[in-house]
Image (cartoon, rainbow, N blue to C red):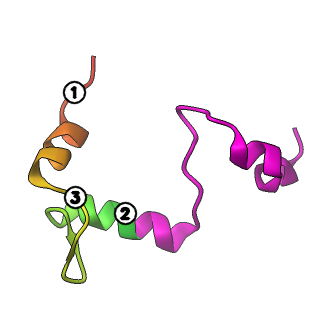
Amino acid sequence: MALIAGNAAEWRRAEILAANGHGNAHSVAQVMSALACGGEVDGVRLLSAEAIDNLIREQV
């Protein structure tokens, strides 16, 4: 698969459970900072306490 395939419309429309996020380094860092900072980024709550618990809980 060519590197450009990640920008193809077909790739972006695909529902791939392990790879469905699209973003640049800055946007990914903002999402991860919400997890690291108790669910809040720049004064905006993005994740509830329950969501954080579900994200860090071992999934089996």
Q: Which of marks 3 and 2 is in front?
A: 3
Residue at (41, 67) in percent of width and height? 29
Residue 7 x/y as whole percent: 79, 56
Residue at (58, 40) in percent of width and height? 19
Residue 51 x/y as whole percent: 19, 46
- How busy is the neighbourhood of tag 3: few (under 14 within 10 Å), some, or many (20 plus)? some
Q: Magenta part of the protein: which range? A: 1-29
Helix, strand, or loop for circle 1?
A: loop
Residue 52 x/y as whole percent: 18, 48
First along the sequence among labels 3 and 2? 2
Q: Is residue 7 left or right of residue 46?
A: right
Q: Mark 3 points at which residue?
A: 47
Image quarter in which the C terminus is found: top left
Q: Name the residue under label 2.
A: 31
Q: Which of marks 1 and 2 is in front?
A: 2
Q: Could you tell me the amino acid type at mark 2?
A: Val
Q: Could you tell me the amino acid type at mark 3?
A: Leu
Q: Is residue 48 left or right of residue 28?
A: left
Image quarter in which the N terminus is found: top right
Q: Is residue 30 left or right of residue 58?
A: right
Quarter of the rendering containing residue 55: top left
Q: Mark 1 points at which residue?
A: 58
